[in-house]
């Protein structure tokens, strides 16, 4: 009996992630299209938190310029353009004002030490271990009293520590790499224990979709922490 590999891999993914879809889209294997594709990203490795970071428990490090220059291979002009695109997006979608001093804005890079990786990919067989490099631009509410958002969230009051991000996942495979761009579609509001749920719009070549990540940093002793990230990425069933 002939087995449909793409559908079998997709079924394994569904069981693992405990998600139920009533209609499983047919995977389009065209190199420029990820229609119907699903992925799971994960990190459970210990790391030493970055110093001087007042959000995400030291998960983010630096100013993100190394990521932009040496991972994304952007020129100074391209970095400036990408930065301005992030600012414009934050202002339009969330009504954020960077002039008041209530919002902290900077570049960031997720620490490589967390060993962020692709665990499952519906287009591939079996368990994966493809490295993910992750970075971009972040806005964080710094005002202890919180801020009131505008844009598509007009009137919503969010607390200190609420985050918004705009960046890229670079997935490094054996003989090539893949870039998935992402941007917050909702505010990331931290919980009392430092955990949060992040919701994104994602884009890869001609494919668009959504991603939902749960991040639950935990102290594991001797100054180490574990990121505890599970990120489920689901592309739409059609390509543009």
Image (cartoon, rainbow, N blue to C red):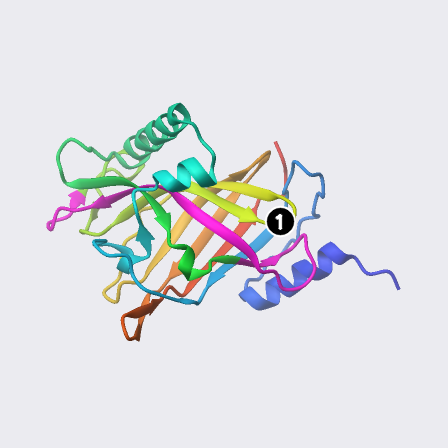
Q: Is residue 131 magenta?
A: yes
Residue ranking furthest to the left = 145
Q: Is residue 139 above or below residue 193?
A: above
Residue at image point 43% right, 67% down = 45
Is residue 182 shown to the viewer in this render? no
Residue 197 position within the rendered picture, expressed as x and y whole percent measured from the top left: 36, 57
Callout 1: SS: loop
User: How many numbered markers are drawn?
Assistant: 1
Q: Which residues are magenta?
A: 118-147
Q: Nearer the viewer, residue 184 or 49?
A: 49
Q: Residues within 10 Å of mark 1 (few under 14, many from 20)?
A: many
Residue 147 position within the rendered picture, expressed as x and y whole percent measured from the top left: 16, 43
142 relative position to 26: left or right: left
Residue at image point 66% right, 58% down = 10
Residue at image point 69% right, 47% down = 27
Residue at image point 54% right, 48% down = 171
Q: Quadrant of residue 40?
A: bottom right
Q: Is residue 48 magenta?
A: no
Q: Is residue 53 above or below residue 156?
A: below
Residue 188 position within the rendered picture, expressed as x and y whole percent measured from the top left: 31, 51
Is residue 172 shown to the viewer in this render? yes
39 relative position to 184: left or right: right
Screen quadrant of the C terminus: top right
Q: Which residue is mark 1?
A: 37
Screen quadrant of the N terminus: bottom right
Residue ranking furthest to the top = 77
Q: Nearer the viewer, residue 169 or 214?
A: 169
Residue ranking furthest to the right = 1
């Amino acid at each position: 009996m002939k087995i449909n590999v793409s559908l079998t891999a997709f079924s394994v993914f569904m069981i693992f992630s405990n998600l139920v879809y009533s209609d499983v889209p047919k995977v389009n294997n065209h190199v420029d299209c990820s229609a119907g594709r699903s992925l799971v990203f994960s990190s459970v490795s210990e790391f030493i938190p970055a110093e001087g970071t007042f959000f995400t428990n030291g998960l983010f490090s630096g100013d993100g310029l190394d990521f932009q220059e040496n991972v994304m291979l952007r020129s100074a002009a391209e970095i400036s353009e990408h930065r301005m695109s992030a600012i414009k997006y934050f202002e339009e979608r969330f009504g954020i004002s960077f002039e008041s001093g209530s919002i902290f804005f900077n570049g960031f890079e997720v620490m490589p030490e967390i060993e962020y990786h692709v665990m499952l990919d519906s287009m591939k067989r079996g368990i994966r271990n493809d490295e993910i490099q992750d970075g971009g631009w972040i806005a964080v509410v710094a005002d202890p009293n919180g801020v009131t958002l505008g844009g598509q969230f007009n009137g919503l009051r969010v607390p200190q520590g609420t985050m918004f991000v705009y960046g890229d996942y670079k997935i490094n495979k054996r003989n090539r790499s893949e870039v998935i761009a992402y941007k917050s579609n909702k505010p990331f509001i931290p919980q009392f224990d430092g955990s949060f749920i992040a919701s994104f719009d994602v884009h890869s070549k001609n494919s668009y979709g959504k991603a939902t990540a749960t991040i639950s940093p935990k102290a594991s002793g001797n100054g180490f922490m574990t990121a505890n990230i599970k990120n489920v990425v689901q592309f739409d069933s059609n390509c543009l």
